[in-house]
Amino acid sequence: MTFDFFSARRPATLASEAMIATSHPLATAAGLEILSAGGNAADAAIAAVAVQSVVDPLMTGIGGDCFVLYAPSGGPGIALNGSGRAPAAASVEAIKAAGLTDTIPRTSPHAVTIPGAISAWCRLHADYGSIPLDRLFHRAIRYAEEGYPVTPRVARDWALSATLVGQDQHAAKVFLPSGAAPKPGDRHAQPLIAARFREIATHGAAGFYEGATAASMVSHLRSLGGLQTVEDFHDGRDQAYWTSPISVAYGGYDVLECPPNGQGLAALLILRILSRFDLGEQLALADRIHLHAEATKLAYHHRDALIADLSECGQLADCLLADDTVDTLASRIAMDRALPPSLWNEPEHKDTIYLCVVDRDGNAVSLINSIFSGFGSTLLDPASGVLFHNRGSSFRLVEGHPNAIGPKKRPMHTIIPGMLCKDGHAVMPFGVMGGHYQAAGHAAFLSNVIDRGMDLQEAMDEPRSFATGGDLQIEPGIPDRIRADLLARGHRPMVVSEPLGGSQAIFIDRDTGFLRAGSDTRKDGMALGF
């Protein structure tokens, strides 16, 4: 490929031994430092996500959830589910008795499930880490105590959330220290989070889920009307668990995703539907966007109706990814018009960071950590400094729905790490941030790489589209004539003012022995290696 050096874009990053790609430069640097010191992929991922939990506080944090795909050298990978469970007292009846009727608002204490991130980090570290946690948290602790420079994209997103986060007096004190969101280049600190990292480094997951910190979090949530208990947090210490990924074949590769309760199944379903069409480079751009939109609508319709805690949908992947299901869904796509989605044969039911690492031994980590919406629930415990996510707002308040809130259930999750494999070996950890866009983003990115032969960075930089909520969101880089074509087919094109997601990927080129990586220019981050 010939790179256009006048494009204002950047080429992919190349290295021979190890590589890390994140959406924040300080997180990338922290992970690279650990790799350079002899740490492995798990060590570097933990160091990087810890830093990003400090320096990108509206997207991620220790009060959130985490999913991981880990591929030891020479293997395809295993999945780590670090999503939190609802309190034992949670039920549709209990939530409605608290005054909620249709949905769980993002700022409600009932939107806070027991955070799963620390359980996942500690499980990953116990099973595959090689460097002590206090060393891995060193940079995160320094940035939390001494401050860090706010980067341009973080500052932009921070300002957009300022009004909302200002509604919680404790969150406002931390995140609007001068009464407004920090500007690019301002210094910001969270010293209480440094204390939490030290507790976790000393006591492991118990430092977060037990003792004074857990008691403080519970006390604050209950003072707001939450149902969380100390016992719920104690049980949360071991809630992260390893499981087998789900996968489909696409374009000569195997695509691995975490099984439900994550929406990785929706990404695989989109790819399976698209596999029934020729998406090569000769396909017109309007047709390509149309096919992605129609496949996305079908997959998300099934996601919203059926994906939930694994206890509610254990055989769903086998059913939805089966040939007859995919053939039926693909046959519903008409090239000349947009159609409303419909389920296969079931009754109808009426913000995030990603990073990936490959180490010198070939171990690969694909990790995503999130507090869901910008600044999560916006609820912050003033004693511990923990900002809680709002993942419980994904639950339904409909008795009998698979994703109805219930005791110790995990909600349907949008965050999904991905892994591409070839001949039984991992060749590319990858991920796309962006809330509900993520499943569609996985499919679009992989199609760019596999169907169109794009370089990783080029595939990320390509203008994006997303069919959601009856609209077809389109980034400004898509030409007017394409928008007009899509409008004529019945889509409702809407040019977005904010970028659609962000992504990172590292390709393990077994022919050359090099690593090739990309980091989305929609974010502040970068890929670095040696």
Image (tube, helix red, strand yellow):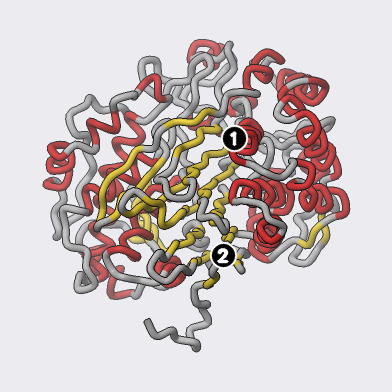
The quadrant of the rendering that contains the N terminus is: bottom left
State the residue in front, 231 or 390: 231
Residue topped by disc 1: 127
Q: Characterize the local packing of mark 1: few (<14), some (14-19) or many (20 or more) Cα atoms within 10 angstroms.
A: few
Tag 1: amino acid: Asp
The x and y percentages for residue 328 are: 13, 40
State the residue in front, 411 or 510: 510
Q: Residue at x 52, y 61 (%)?
A: 498
Q: Quadrant of residue 447?
A: bottom left
Q: Which residue of the protein is positioned furthest toward the bottom in this rendering?
A: 6
State the residue in front, 438 or 161: 438
The x and y percentages for residue 274 are: 22, 53
Return the mark for residue 317.
none
Tag 2: amino acid: Glu
Q: Is residue 485 above or below residue 64?
A: below
Q: Earlier in the sequence, mark 1 or mark 2?
A: 2
Q: Is residue 97 above or below residue 316?
A: above
The x and y percentages for residue 339 are: 20, 48
Q: Is residue 476 visible?
A: no
Q: Characterize the local packing of mark 2: few (<14), some (14-19) or many (20 or more) Cα atoms within 10 angstroms.
A: some
Tell me the element at label 2.
loop
Q: Residue at x 81, y 53 (%)?
A: 143
State the residue in front, 484 or 12: 12
| Relative to 235, 279 lies left or right | left
| Relative to 526, 174 lies left or right | right
The x and y percentages for residue 428 are: 43, 57
Residue topped by disc 2: 17
Q: Quadrant of residue 147?
A: bottom right
Tell me the element at label 1.
helix
Q: Is residue 113 above or below residue 418?
A: above
Alpha-carbon span between mark 1 and mark 2 = 23 Å
